[in-house]
Image (spheres, grey):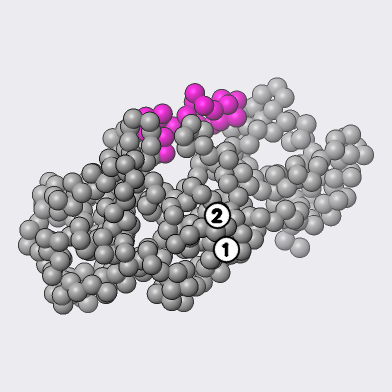
Amino acid sequence: MTDPLGIQSSLPPLYAGWLSEALPGAIPAETKATCENCAMCQQNANTGSQAMFFNPNTKCCTYLPELANFLVGRILAEPDASTVPGRDRLEEWIDRGIAVTPFGAVKPPLYDLLYTQATDFFGKSEAMLCPYYIKEGGLCGIWQHRNSICATWYCKHNRGAVGFTFWRTLQKMLGMAERYLAVWCILQLDLGATALKKLFPVENPNQAGAMRTPLNAKQLDGIKDEDNYRVLWGNWLGREKDYYRVCGQLVSGLSWEQVLDIGGIELRMMDRLTLEAYQNLVSEEIPPRLQSGTFQIIRSGSNRHLVETYSIYDPLSMPRQLMEVLDYFDGRPTEEAVQAIYDEKDLNLTAGLIRKLTDFQVLRPTDS
């Protein structure tokens, strides 16, 4: 799978190839979200334009991704030496038989419990640090094959809420594809009838196809449940790594159209919504009528305000003079509002500035 359009080279290669088929052009880079020199860490940020900071020892990697079976297989088969730490950790889990099923590698039960119950830990708690994180250099050990959440999450967006919406829509599409493809791989490989009944219990439809299994005492203690494990893996018991590698090979050969066929109507709907979000992302159109949006002033200075709009991670620093003219945008034609501000306040608002204020929801389109 290639990426002929050069779509966002930071995406995992498999997903970049699919998106070169799904989208009509390249995805603009998110230049404000600098992973190498974390924009959310205090030593790299402009403290006057930042509301909160991440722990430099964790950055945003206080999240453990669930990896679909084909992603596990691609990680195991990756020859790049930089992935060795991540691959070693994954192989350790597979060898222990903890939090690995034919669906893929899931969160260990204790981590999952902490993640769902803890508060105010994201980007801060070293106890929640992703085990695939390479502390020396602050790199990701599975970067080339990370899942849809890690591949699409950005702390900051060049286009503000417009970019946020695009990446969240893309994540939902890729996440849905991951789930369908994981099940497709299971169907391609002969686990055996008993394993399939365990993985897709008829008596509990809500659990069917779930990547996790119900929490029990052995899982809490980090002990493999031998009986349950044996049933889950069926005919592939003892060959789990081979199973994952085959999954990786099967999915790596699929085109995006084939992935859509596997995912069916739901995935095709997300494909359409992603295309619409992409078109909004690359459009520079300014709404014909605007009005002041909803935002929160989180810090005030003599000449500037720091405001939170669509995300606490991406506040906007605004001159006081600009804040004072927002009420001119009251639903009248945008051109009239801009002209009135120029005539009465001697302030020239460029099209680029108005677009940015709209992107960050300081201004929003008038419904009628």
Q: Is residue 148 left or right of residue 361?
A: left
The label shown at residue 23 is 1
Residue 146: x, y in percent? 38, 51
* Among the 4 quarters of the image, the one containing residue 198: bottom left
In what element is the residue under mark 1? loop
In the rendered view, would you say 265 is above or below 121? below
Q: Which residue is mark 2?
A: 7
Q: Quadrant of the N terminus?
A: bottom left
- Amino acid under disc 1: Leu
Tell me the SS state at disc 2: loop
Residue 43 in magenta stretch: yes
Q: Which residues, given as a range, are shown in magenta?
A: 40-60
Q: Residue at x 31, y 62 (%)?
A: 248
Callout 2 crowding tier (Cα within 10 Å): few <14, some 14–19, many ≥20: many
Viewer-proximal residue, 25 or 340? 25
Marker disc for residue 165: none
